[in-house]
Amino acid sequence: MAETVSARFRRIWLAFGWLWVAAILWLSLTPIPPQPLTFEYSDKLEHTLAYLFLMGWFAVVYRGRRRIASAAGLVTMGVLIEILQGLSGYRYFEYADMLANSAGVLIGWGIAQTRFGRTLKVLESNGKY
């Protein structure tokens, strides 16, 4: 199945998505990440929102098998990051973070099925649905 965005902008949209992946990897593996939210379980909200955004972004760029592969890849990334954190000696392995990451992927997938799933297409067409 074809991508949802035009070939003209596809590389730009993918570059933004991969930059976000790189940012999440850095934030997840750096010894002392920034702490923008500071209430109980705020880190779980941060995990969920980060992966929601990522899945939403890639779900807008891709359809069909590529969208499924993106979801599987993001869930796998979340699990691998937790394993690496546990091995690091300065971060913690948490099953709850894996669950929050996966929940974000699932919610992002769901949102992509709504009108928000056409966001980049609308931007490409100068705001016309």
Image (spheres, rainbow, N blue to C red):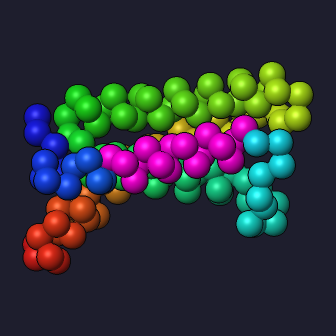
Task: Residue at 21%, 70% (x, y): give it.
Answer: 123
The x, y position of residue 74, in whole percent, is: 47, 35
Single out the residue that lies furthest toward the right.
Answer: 89
Q: Measuring 32% from the left and 46% from the top, which residue is drawn there?
A: 14
Predominant secondary structure, magenta span: helix
Q: Position of residue 22 (x, y in %)?
A: 54, 43
Image side of residue 93 versus residue 127, left or right: right
Residue at 19%, 34% in the rendered image? 64
**Nearer to me, 57 or 27:** 27
Q: Image quarter for residue 118?
A: bottom left
Q: Nearer the viewer, residue 43 or 3?
A: 3
> Is residue 1 depicted above or below 60 in this figure?
above
Using residue 111 as the reference point, say whether residue 75 is left or right of it. Answer: right
| Callout count | 0
**45 is higher (above) or lower (below) than 122:** above
Q: Is residue 8 visible?
A: yes
Q: Horizontally, is 75 left or right of 82 in the view?
A: left
Residue 45 occupies quadrant: bottom right
In front here: 50 or 99?
A: 50
* Observer able to see residue 103: no
Residue 115 location (% of width, % of height) = 23, 64
Which residue in the rendered view is the most extreme toward the bottom? 127
Q: Which quadrant would residue 126 be assigned to in this image? A: bottom left
Residue 74 on the magenta segment:
no
**10 vs 83, nearest the viewer:** 10
Indicate the quadrant containing the N terminus: top left, top right, bottom left or bottom right: top left
Q: Which residues are magenta?
A: 14-29
Residue at horizontal 77%, vertical 58%? 34
Which quarter shows the C terminus? bottom left
